[in-house]
Structure formats: structure tokens, C-alpha cells
Image (tube, helix red, strand yellow):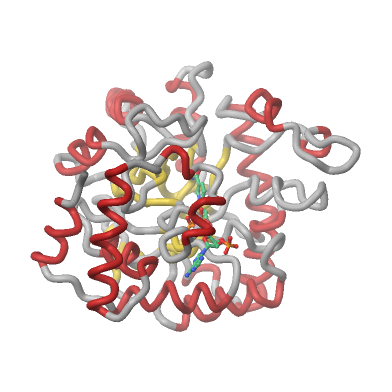
């Protein structure tokens, strides 16, 4: 797997990041270890988790510690902590994940946003110690603000992150689900006191465009503003999450069942799906693989975070690394619209 620079840090990481969100919940310990082993065997080193993965799975068995815990166990078993580039996140964890369900284990989704921890200094301070303990390490390579917090002043969040860097607990910081103006404001604030700025932004991004005004709640989809910003700000790298929109590209039934499909389903999506399917057929690959290959060839460059719920899916998705797209093919994919 090729290595690419993260922002302008001088640090090179694998061109794909492994999405570890479902490890320890949907994906059991054995398959999680196998997935991690396979990823590093082919040269991957960039792992993505968070301090809340994945509390929402199941009927109350999980609280959000599970993915970090599995990663900590795997790194300890393999003795490879300093050979992986470990990213985790703070801010989206629930204050009380056990109280967010009814007696049958169903989530009260209307209460979730009010229960999030967000980015106050004491949350970050406690969050980093808990993550370090679960991950069985004394440093995090990339620490993200998981969702934007419009109440805590950015100065307080940033100075706390900066202190963690100075203490050696964190190497770099990133943000996720931030609007472009908030990323820019944060990095300007950091500059004024010569503190660390965000070197990565993690947003939802895939081949289909959401409808104008689509509301994803706390999640933020990449938009033209961010792409334009990144062209002129190479110190920040884009990490697309949910690159396959939960795996909808080859399966119409899955598409119809996808909880956000109504936010994409229009003539533009149909036009793009048609062109995507035609090209995937010519290349003898799946639509899902072509979407990932498109992200690997994307400008401004991106490091997609590969999601999977089984080892077969992971193997299938990793094959996208071998797909070569010409400038003409990229141009056809990019220019397609209704
Ligand atoms: N920063 C954030 O707010 C945020 C949010 C979400 C995720 N993330 C990160 O991004 C990573 C990836 O996100 P994601 O899981 O949402 O990614 P995704 O690529 O959109 O979805 C992954 C899901 O798609 C299905 N899938 C994957 N490969 C497939 C294939 N080849 N064929 C058919 N179906 C396939 C599986 O679901 P089924 O089980 O239904 O088959 C799998 O769980 C996560 O692990 C996490 O690290 C970050």
C-alpha cells in the first residue's frame, strides 16, 4: 500500500485508513484481530476509532468502549504500537449510554444529541485518559474533535488539545463533522497563539451527492466549499468516512433500506449510479470498489476510511487499491450529473 503525507506534517501514513468502528460489537474479537493483521500485512498502518464505538449496536450490550479496547488488546498482543498510526476521537460519546434505551433495549434517538459529551476541557482531559487506558498506550497519533461544539469556545477546546500535545499524549489533532468556516476559524485561532492546528478533517463523503439542504444531524457531508478550501490548504488532509454509504452501490434493496437514502435519491444520484455501474462493468469490478478507487484518485487527495462488517467485505474493498483510473475516467465520473 502506498504512503501519503498527512497534511504537511512530514508524517507518511497508509493511503487507506482502516475503519475500526464495529470491532468488538458487530465484529468479534477473532475477526477484528484477523482484519487488523491483514491490513498491516499489506502495508496499512492508519487505524481509525473513537471513544464511543459502537454504543448504538445491539440492545444495550455496548457502551462505546469496545472498539478502542479491542485495538488496545491487538496492539499489545502484536507488540506493534509504534508501527501503527492510531487515530481516535473525543466529543461524541454519550454521558450515559445505559440510560438512552427503553426496557427492551431500543434507543431513544430523540435524546441522543442532548446526551453527547462535546468538547469542554474537562471532557477532553477525562476522555484522553480513558482512551489511553483502553488503547493500552501512552500516546495517540491523531486525536479528533468528533463533532463540532458550538457552546464551548473554540479557544478552550484548542488550548486543551495543545496542552495534550505538549504533554506528549497526542501528536496531531484533527476535526470531524466541522463546517469549513469552523475549521478555518479554529486554525486561525491556533495560529494566533502559535498552537497546533487541525491537520485532518474527517467528513462523510462518497460518490453520490446529497440533495441540496440534506440534513444529516450532527454528521457533516463534504461540500464544494470544503473541497475548494482544501485545494488551497494542503496542511489539512480530508478523510472521507462512510465512503460506501453503508454499502449501497451494488444492491438496490440495500439502497432502498439505507436510513439516509431519501437524502440522496434524485435524478443526479440515478445519473451517477448509471455511469458508475457502466464503468465498473467495463473494469470488471464492483460499484463499491469503483467508488473507493475514485476516492484513492481524488483531488484534493483523500485518505478514505474503509468500513466493513465482515472479512469478505474487507478483502473485497481492499482490492480497490489495485484499480487504476485514467484522468479521462476520473473526469467522466466527476462530470456526471443530472
Ligand atoms: N467521524 C465520524 O463521524 C464517523 C462516522 C461514521 C464512520 N466513521 C469512521 O469511518 C469508518 C467507515 O464508516 P462506515 O462503516 O460508515 O463506512 P461505509 O463504507 O459507508 O459502510 C460500511 C458498511 O457498508 C457495508 N459494506 C462494506 N463493504 C461492503 C461491500 N463490499 N459490499 C456490500 N456492503 C458492504 C457493511 O454494512 P452491512 O453490515 O450492512 O453489510 C459495512 O458495515 C468507520 O469504521 C469509522 O472509523 C466516522
Q: Residue at x 14, y 51 (%)?
A: 335
Left or right, 261 with reference to 75? left
Residue extending furthest left? 328
**Residue 173, x across and y down, in percent:** 42, 43
Q: Residue at x 51, y 24 (%)?
A: 149
Q: Nearer the viewer, residue 77 or 139?
A: 77
Q: Residue at x 48, y 29 (%)?
A: 148
- Counting labels gives 0
307 to 145, vertically: above or below: below
Left or right, 204 with reference to 233? right
**Residue 253, x across and y down, in percent:** 53, 59
Q: Nearer the viewer, residue 313 or 172?
A: 313
Position of the C terminus, as image quadrant, is: top left
**Residue 239, x across and y down, in percent:** 37, 51
**Residue 66, x across and y down, in percent:** 71, 56
Left or right, 80 with reference to 17? right
Q: Nearer the viewer, residue 112 or 267?
A: 267
Q: Nearer the viewer, residue 254 or 242?
A: 254
Position of the N terminus, as image quadrant, is: bottom left
Q: Is residue 191 visible?
A: yes
Q: Is residue 86 visible?
A: no
Q: Quadrant of residue 193?
A: top left
Q: Residue at x 22, y 63 (%)?
A: 297
Q: Quadrant of residue 27?
A: bottom right
Residue extending furthest right? 103
Amino acid at each position: 500500500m502506498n504512503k501519503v503525507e498527512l497534511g504537511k506534517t512530514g508524517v507518511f501514513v497508509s493511503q487507506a485508513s482502516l475503519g475500526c468502528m464495529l470491532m468488538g460489537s458487530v465484529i468479534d474479537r477473532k475477526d477484528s484481530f484477523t482484519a487488523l493483521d491483514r491490513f498491516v500485512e499489506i502495508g496499512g498502518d492508519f487505524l481509525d476509532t473513537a471513544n464511543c464505538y459502537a454504543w448504538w449496536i445491539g440492545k444495550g450490550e455496548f457502551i462505546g468502549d469496545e472498539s478502542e479496547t479491542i485495538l488496545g488488546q491487538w496492539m499489545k498482543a502484536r507488540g506493534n504500537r509504534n508501527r501503527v498510526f492510531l487515530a481516535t476521537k473525543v466529543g461524541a460519546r454519550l454521558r450515559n449510554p445505559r440510560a438512552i434505551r427503553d426496557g427492551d433495549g431500543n434507543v431513544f434517538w430523540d435524546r441522543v444529541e442532548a446526551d453527547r459529551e462535546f468538547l469542554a476541557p474537562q471532557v477532553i482531559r477525562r476522555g484522553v485518559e480513558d482512551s489511553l487506558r483502553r488503547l493500552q498506550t501512552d500516546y495517540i497519533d491523531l486525536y479528533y474533535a468528533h463533532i463540532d461544539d458550538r457552546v464551548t469556545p473554540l479557544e478552550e477546546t484548542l488550548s486543551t488539545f495543545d496542552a495534550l500535545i505538549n504533554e506528549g499524549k497526542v501528536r496531531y489533532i484533527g476535526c470531524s463533522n466541522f463546517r469549513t468556516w469552523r475549521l478555518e476559524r479554529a486554525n486561525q485561532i491556533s495560529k494566533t497563539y502559535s498552537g497546533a492546528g487541525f491537520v485532518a478533517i474527517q467528513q462523510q463523503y462518497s460518490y453520490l451527492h446529497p440533495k441540496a439542504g440534506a440534513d444529516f444531524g450532527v454528521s457533516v457531508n463534504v461540500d464544494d466549499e470544503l473541497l475548494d478550501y482544501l485545494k488551497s490548504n494542503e496542511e489539512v488532509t480530508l478523510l472521507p468516512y462512510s465512503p460506501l454509504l453503508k454499502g449501497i452501490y451494488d444492491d438496490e434493496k440495500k439502497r432502498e433500506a439505507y436510513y439516509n437514502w431519501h437524502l440522496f435519491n434524485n435524478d443526479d444520484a440515478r445519473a451517477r449510479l448509471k455511469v458508475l455501474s457502466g464503468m465498473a462493468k467495463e473494469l470488471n469490478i464492483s460499484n463499491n470498489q469503483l467508488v473507493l478507487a475514485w476516492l484513492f484518485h481524488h483531488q484534493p487527495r483523500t485518505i478514505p476510511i474503509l468500513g466493513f462488517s465482515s472479512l469478505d467485505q474487507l478483502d473485497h474493498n481492499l482490492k480497490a487499491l489495485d484499480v487504476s483510473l485514467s484522468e479521462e475516467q476520473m473526469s467522466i465520473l466527476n462530470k456526471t450529473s443530472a
